[in-house]
Amino acid sequence: MVNFPVLQTLNLSFNNLEGDVPVEGVFRNVSAGEVKGNTGLCGGIQVLHLPACPIQRSKKHKKLKLILAISIAAAFCLTLFSLMTLSWLKKSKKKCLSISTYGTPNQKISYKELHNATDGFSLKNLIGSGSFGSVYKGKLGPNETHVAVKVINLQKQGASKSFIAECEALRNIRHRNLVKILTACSSIDFEGNDFKALVYEFMPNGSLEMQLHLEDGLKQLRSLNLLQRINIAIDVASALLYLHNHCQTPIIHCDLKPSNILLDDDMIAHISDFGLARLLSKSRKEAFLNQLSSAGIKGTVGYAAPEYGMGSQLSTNGDVYSFGILLLEMLTGRKPTNKLFKDDLNLHNFVKLALPGRVMEIVDHSIFNKVGENDNMVSSWSDWTSGQIECLISVFHIGLACSAQSSIDRMDMNRVALELLSIKRKFLWKLNVTGKAQE
């Protein structure tokens, strides 16, 4: 109406109108009689005698009020969500977190269950200890399944990273010669202290270390003959070949030694303890994961590759070196840290100097036990043919080739596995021929 200049008169009486009456246009000359009967009107020119209109709040003010209301509501919701999350985390910490190596769900177990399964982590159930923890034998579940529980010593520097590294390394890998992790536990103990543990399949025949280095009073019980040692070597080589070449992300074990080789009921070997394992980048130029310090922990004295001591990068060749030393130890029965080895003499040179003519002087004599028997050395050594001794020397040569001082001179693990299988077939053939000749 204000914008219609041709409009001369306007009668709005008795229309029950409401709102602010303008003071421009036709409304400058309107009379009181023309707006009567509209009690809801306000403002306008003075002659209309209408009540004053209430002050209108600006749109900007209304917008600020709306924003403030939304902000307060959002803050309240966020606070409520945070409180609920903290409450959930507090409750969940009381139980163990379970993971599956192979993607199948595992029942969560509590610290209390692991405590009961191992009789309170008693010394009678202690079956081994390592750099970052102790391993206990236990029984879990209604079927009392035998398990090995590795309790991480969180007081040790780097132990938590070791726990994470082992979980990460074993999470997505599967091989018959790798130890199977059943679940991992990250919880608190009865005193409120942090508790971390890994639960593995139990290996009834213990470690290769136990088999090779029994105490003096039990040495007569040793039964690992050459064929069994070759089988174990093939198992370990197969596992390393898988870790280095057939995993989605290649893995370096970094701590291969007899105590980390476990034997099941059938004397099948399984590599264990991935606490120092590293994942390789796709370029394979550097290892990443769980670098515990600037220097890094790169294995055990005697088994760690010599280039690591000079600050070289971790590589699969380091595992090959450890395998070579492991193989020489299996054949000689001597640890690389034996007191015999000092100055320039080490296990590698000790074997190299003796081959081939003096092989019988350095070999572990219990290796001559007949397959499936525990004959003493004298009665079984005489049964060996020159062909079988050649097989023994061939295995020694593989150990030497893998433990070469220079990493580029070491044998490829694929070739190692193939040659060991070839030696095994040759040895069995020689054994079969000898058996028929004796008949």
Image (cartoon, grey):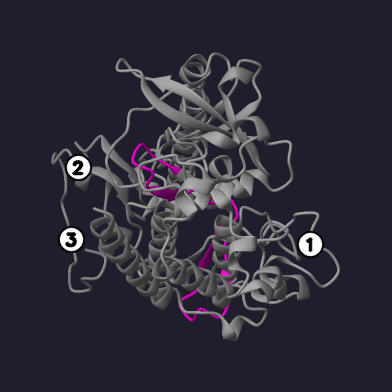
Q: Amino acid at mark 2?
A: Leu
Q: Residue 392, labelled with which disc? A: none
Q: Residues within 10 Å of mark 2 (few under 14, many from 20)?
A: some
- Identified at 76% across, 65% down, the residue is 295
Q: Is residue 95 visible?
A: yes
Gap between marks 1 and 2, in whole Å?
112 Å
Return the mark for residue 17.
Answer: 2
Please tell me whether mark 1 or mark 2 is closer to you in this view: 1
Q: Label 1, on which residue?
A: 341
SS at circle 2: loop
Q: Which residue is mark 3?
A: 9
**Residue segment shown in magenta:** 263-289
Q: Is residue 211 above or below residue 239?
A: above
Horizontal and vertical percent position of residue 260: 55, 48
The type of residue carrying mark 1 is Phe
Badge 1: few (under 14), some or many (20 or more) residues near its Cα, within 10 Å?
some
| Number of numbered discs overlaid on the protein picture | 3
Which one is in front, 36 or 223?
A: 223
Q: Earlier in the sequence, mark 1 or mark 3?
A: 3
Horizontal and vertical percent position of residue 211: 53, 42
